[in-house]
């Protein structure tokens, strides 16, 4: 499913009306019906509603929602920020209908009626935010800001229509202030701003409602949302005749003094992901320790320049071994010093198989990212925001404020696949495409989680998946495993690892559940 910005959404809307011939009033009615459908299915106990309708079509959606709720016998208090008769087009149709059936539209045009609005707000079971929509491109101030503040200060749950008011649909920026929604029902396609920082924090649970805008109108757009069905289709089959020799061979280069645990987690993850054979290459003085912890992984002892630090001269040994493997992953627990930089220079330039670079290996490449352009195949990089900031010479906040564009820019510059970790991890490709992952959350915020991801990516590549699909599938399943872990404190990376099996099993169930109602899809598959 495509993820788009405000301009692309407006163009798809225009083409649907002007070129395909679907009346705008039908689109607005369908949008309102989808919101009602969501409410009835997810908040069946709600009986009284406050609907806040702003200008334009988003406000028109609010008017239509209020009309449908009223016709169904619910208690509805409708508040509009628009003067009587000022709505145009499809929104105007709904305004005229409400006036002719003597339905009261409360007008909140200045501060004088704010207290009454707040009073009715607190008496409602549910607030419907149809105030600003996807067109916000400047700071929200004055009365609009007061209304948003009132909603956020209330204890009443909030459903936002299309996007929380005050969120920039193109990048997720909070434009001064924004509604903190419990749920967002967005139309036809998820908006970029709903899935990027900070919008993702304001949107709550996101539902995608189909309203008769054809999907093919945005086929050219570059960003996709990962879904359970798509990931399920990516995973390689495991034939009955499978044996360890034909289910993939992974070569991991990992570990340094005090960081052997990272190597162990990455190795275990590669096996749990389905790889038939996993080789873990580590400095000589660490290989015995690592081997004692890993029963199923084959350890390789490498020459070292000092205890625990792999010698750059080990490159030839590793390259020879890589020739009989399917993927080379370097980084979990590696020292980021100059010896590792020298080792990586040789591995990146000459590796005959795809390379995955994480953690200490990323640190060793800082300031030397041009080495990536010498790789025979685009490598996979897995930075968290702090690592990305160091690699590009920016602040963490600068990275977080523009996650999608940063990932896309540097995937192109470094000719690499960038996995920019974080809430709604972004996978960006050198050709300008990207995917946004909806799984994962606070459970992944623990030491070793990134090492698990590296091992899983390598595992999938080894089993014959394309590097692009392996990156996407690993991010999705790793996040899903983290979400299966019971919420709250009291778990470690190993707990996430042992939820991989459940995550694989859950994929099919999540895909089937999504198919039950193709008109109203939940972004997170559970």
Image (cartoon, rainbow, N blue to C red):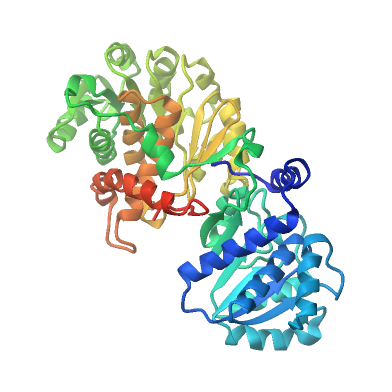
- Give how far across and how far down residue 78 sits, in percent: 70, 78
Quick check: 311 left or right of 290?
Answer: right
Quick check: 269 left or right of 51?
Answer: left
Q: Compared with residue 313, is residue 439 higher up or lower down, i.e. above or below?
A: below
Q: Compared with residue 145, is residue 310 higher up or lower down, i.e. above or below?
A: above
Q: Considering depth in this image, is 502 or 211 the residue closer to the camera?
A: 211
Quick check: 183 left or right of 242?
Answer: right
Q: Considering depth in this image, is 281 or 142 the residue closer to the camera?
A: 142
- Of the 4 image quadrants, the one containing the C terminus is bottom left
For the image, the number of numbered tags is: 0
Query: What residue sits 83% from the left and 67% below the top?
Result: 87
Based on the displayed image, in which of its 4 quarters is residue 358 positioned?
Answer: top left
Specify whether residue 175 is in view: no
Query: What residue sits 59% from the left and 46% below the top?
Result: 395
- Give how far across and how far down residue 65 sits, in percent: 65, 70
Q: Considering depth in this image, is 296 or 43 the residue closer to the camera?
A: 43
Q: Considering depth in this image, is 85 or 159 the residue closer to the camera?
A: 85
Specify whether residue 432 is in view: yes
- Give how far across and how far down residue 156 sits, in percent: 55, 79
Query: What residue sits 62% from the left and 37% below the top?
Result: 216
- Give how far across and how far down residue 345 sits, in percent: 44, 18
């Amino acid at each position: 499913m495509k993820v788009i910005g405000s301009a692309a959404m407006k163009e798809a809307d225009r083409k649907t009306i002007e070129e395909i011939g679907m009346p705008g009033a039908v689109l607005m009615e369908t949008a309102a019906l989808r919101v009602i459908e969501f409410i009835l299915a997810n908040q069946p106990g709600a009986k009284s509603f406050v609907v806040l309708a702003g200008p334009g079509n988003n406000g028109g959606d609010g008017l239509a929602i209020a009309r449908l709720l009223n016709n169904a016998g619910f208690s509805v208090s409708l508040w509009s920020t628009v003067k009587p008769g000022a709505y145009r087009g499809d929104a105007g149709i709904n305004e005229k209908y409400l006036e002719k059936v003597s339905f009261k539209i409360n007008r909140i045009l200045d501060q004088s009626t704010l207290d009454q609005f707040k009073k009715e707000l607190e008496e409602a079971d549910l607030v419907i935010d149809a105030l600003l929509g996807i067109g916000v491109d400047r700071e929200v101030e004055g009365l609009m800001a007061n209304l948003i503040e009132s909603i956020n200060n209330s204890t009443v749950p909030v459903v936002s229509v299309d996007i929380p008011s005050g969120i920039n649909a193109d990048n997720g920026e909070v434009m001064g202030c924004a509604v903190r929604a419990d749920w967002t029902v967005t139309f036809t396609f998820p908006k970029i701003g709903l899935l990027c920082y900070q919008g993702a924090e304001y949107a709550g649970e996101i539902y995608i409602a189909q309203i008769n805008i054809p999907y093919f109108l945005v086929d050219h757009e570059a960003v996709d949302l990962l879904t359970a069905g798509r990931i399920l289709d990516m995973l390689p089959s495991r034939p009955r005749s499978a044996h360890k020799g034909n289910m993939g061979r992974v070569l991991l280069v990992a570990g340094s003094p005090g960081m052997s645990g990272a190597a162990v987690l990455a190795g275990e993850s590669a096996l749990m992901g389905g790889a038939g054979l996993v080789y873990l290459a580590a400095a000589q003085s660490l290989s015995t320790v690592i081997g004692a912890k890993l029963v199923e992984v084959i350890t390789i002892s490498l020459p070292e320049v000092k205890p625990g630090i792999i010698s750059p001269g080990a490159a030839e040994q590793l390259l020879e071994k890589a020739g009989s493997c399917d993927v080379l992953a370097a980084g979990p627990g590696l020292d980021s010093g100059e010896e590792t930089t020298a080792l990586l220079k040789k591995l990146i330039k000459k590796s005959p198989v795809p390379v995955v670079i994480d953690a200490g290996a990323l640190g060793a490449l800082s300031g030397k990212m041009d080495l990536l352009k010498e790789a025979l195949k685009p490598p996979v990089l897995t930075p968290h925001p702090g690592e990305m900031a160091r690699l590009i010479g920016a602040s963490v906040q600068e990275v977080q404020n523009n996650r999608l564009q940063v990932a896309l820019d540097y995937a192109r510059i470094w000719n690499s696949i960038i996995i920019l970790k974080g809430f709604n991890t972004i996978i960006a490709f050198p050709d300008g495409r990207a995917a946004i992952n909806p799984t994962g959350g606070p459970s992944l915020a623990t030491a070793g989680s990134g090492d698990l991801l590296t091992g899983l990516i390598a595992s999938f590549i080894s089993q014959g998946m394309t590097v692009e699909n392996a990156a996407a599938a690993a991010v999705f399943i790793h996040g899903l495993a983290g979400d299966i872990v019971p919420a709250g404190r009291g778990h470690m990376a190993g707990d996430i690892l042992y939820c991989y099996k459940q995550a694989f099993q859950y994929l099919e169930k999540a895909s089937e559940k999504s198919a039950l109602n193709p008109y109203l899809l939940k972004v997170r598959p559970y």
